[in-house]
Each structure stands twice: as structure tokens, then as C-alpha cells.
Amino acid sequence: MIELEINPATMKMELNVRELPNSCVVVICDGKAKLRELPPYGEYKIITHQGKVKRMRKEEGEEF
């Protein structure tokens, strides 16, 4: 997980899409931004409570 910088004066964030992984998610909550690469397979859950992000969890299972 990579923490992204948000300019506190302008509350803006800059991302260079060429430097990002091919498959990723950016989550913004309470003025903080975090980037996480998505797995090649499986589920990725973002758990919220009362409108705030509490956890980000990767779940990989096996299918028969």
C-alpha cells in the first residue's frame, strides 16, 4: 500500500498514470489517499463504517 500526497493548501492530488500499476485502486477518506495494486485474481474488499474506510482486504480463494 502506498500513501499518496494530498496538498493540504489546495486539497488536490496529482498522479502520473504512467507510474501506476496496470490494475490498482485509489481510496480517499478523511483527507488521506492510499493506492493499492489489485491482485491478478481473487477479491479485494473495502470495508467501511459510518461512511469512513476502516479496512482494505485482499481475499484469494480457490475454485473447483
Image: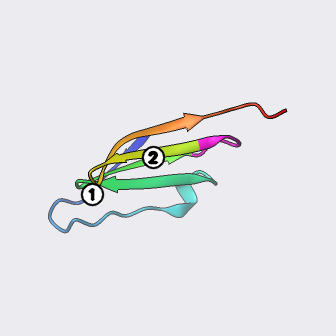
Question: Which numbered tag is attached to residue 46?
Answer: 2
Residue visible at 49% across and 37% down in the picture? 57
| Percent of width and height locating residue 8 | 17, 59
Instruction: Characterize the local packing of mark 1: few (<14), some (14-19) or many (20 or more) Cα atoms within 10 angstroms.
Output: some
Residue placed under numbered mark 1 in the picture? 6
Marks 2 and 1 sit apart, C-alpha to C-alpha, by: 21 Å
Q: Identify the image quadrant of residue 43.
A: top right
Instruction: Place residue 55 in its image quadrant.
Output: top left
**Most prominent secondary structure in the magenta stretch?**
loop
Q: Which residue is drawn at 79% across and 34% down?
A: 63
Tell me the amino acid under the disc marked 1: Ile
Magenta residues?
38-43
Which quadrant of the rendered structure holds the N terminus?
top left
Horizontal arrangement in the rendering, residue 37 relative to residue 7 (left or right): right
Check the image and tell me how it is coloured. rainbow
Q: Do the residues labelled 2 and 1 touch (CB within 8 Å)?
A: no
Membership of 51 in magenta stretch: no
Q: Earlier in the sequence, mark 2 or mark 1?
A: 1
Say which amino acid is labelled 2: Ile
- Identify the residue shown where x is 44% and y is 55%: 26
Q: For the point 34% across and 56% down, which residue is it?
A: 28
Secondary element type, mark 1 = loop
